[in-house]
Amino acid sequence: MTATTQLTYTSIWLAVFARQLCLPVPAILFLMSAGALVGEGQLHLPLVLLAGVLGCLCGDGVWFWLGRRWGSRVIRLVCGLSGDPRVCVTKSRKTFDKWGLRILVVAKFVPGLDGVTPPLAGAEGATLKGFVAYDSVGALLWAAAYVALGVVFANQLDRGLLLAERFGTLLGLVIGVPLLMYVTWRLLHLVRVIRHLRLRRISPALLQRRIDDGDKIAIMDLLYFEARTTEVAGIPGAVRIDPKRLRTGPRIVVPEDVNIVLYCTSKNEFTSARVAETLKKRGFDNVWVLEGGLDAWVLEERPVTMQLSTPEEAAARVGLVIPKM
């Protein structure tokens, strides 16, 4: 096992810890390699499992604390990386409401659920003792499964690692270059979003003044993405709409003299930024994001209502047309 003799308990812990923090580290390969070494008597099974469990607990503990500290903001951040953020939030909350902390036992085997469950547990007010207990069981089952695979397929794993060692440079180029390109693309995407926010933000006071002056403004409420079981009051005259409908649905129709103002409840206007960028790509220049979102509007004691405008009322008032899906 020349390709895996440098594997240590500390490296296993670090790999698993990094994976739970959503870093691109092949922790599963580390566990399988450790399993192969366990089979040859070079590593001790209890210590390998302990390293894996501690790595999970430390990484998940960070997300649990973030969820406890910032609540739904962290959930939206994690789900914002998925293909459909609203579905991710809704599905995750329903699953947690149904199973509670017990979902941690199997969450690591379910793509997507693993990342959102620890911060969701913190946001939902789960006790630290209960979180550690269930997460430990889930981590142990997860680590044991891949260590067992390493024991069973030790010979095949060793040949693969030896091949990787021989052609390491080539593999590094094949895997590393696309990964670097992807990371660069994501960074450029983030820069564009931030730049768009800086250029197109409107304060609650300015929006209120423009409403009072009778300016043609189409206010779009994006709280459908964040809403749970109860309705949330919004800005008078706003139309509550699913962000996905604006990003992937049929193109809306907005007169050239009408400004679009988007708002959500995220402090950093993350949802609004994604929608604003999409609308800009679709040819809409007069798109603004409410600075501080609905929270800033409410903090300044500006009016809110449960009776928001319908798409038909918005069409009659400013000519905004929202096609049906």
Image: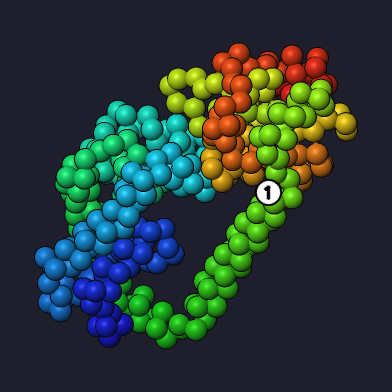
Q: Is residue 209 left or right of residue 35?
A: right
Q: Residue at x 17, y 63 (%)?
A: 49
Q: Residue at x 58, y 73 (%)?
A: 177
Residue pointed to by mark 1: 197
Q: Residue at x 37, y 49 (%)?
A: 66
Inspect this view and state whether residue 251 appears: no
Residue 320 coordinates in the image, percent (x, y): 79, 24
Inspect this view and state whether residue 292 appears: yes
Q: Image quarter for residue 40?
A: bottom left
Quarter containing the N terminus: bottom left
- Of residues 299 and 48, the one nearer the viewer is 299
Q: Is residue 80 left or right of residue 93?
A: right
Residue 153 coordinates in the image, percent (x, y): 25, 67
- Of residues 133 and 199, the one nearer the viewer is 199
- Of residues 74 and 323, the one nearer the viewer is 74
- The three-letter amino acid code for the residue at tag 1 is Leu
Q: Residue at x 33, y 44 (%)?
A: 68
Residue 187 coordinates in the image, percent (x, y): 61, 62
Count of marks placed on residues: 1
Residue 94 coordinates in the image, percent (x, y): 37, 29
Examine the rendered structure and indicate whether residue 314 appears above or below residue 187: above
Quarter containing the C terminus: top right
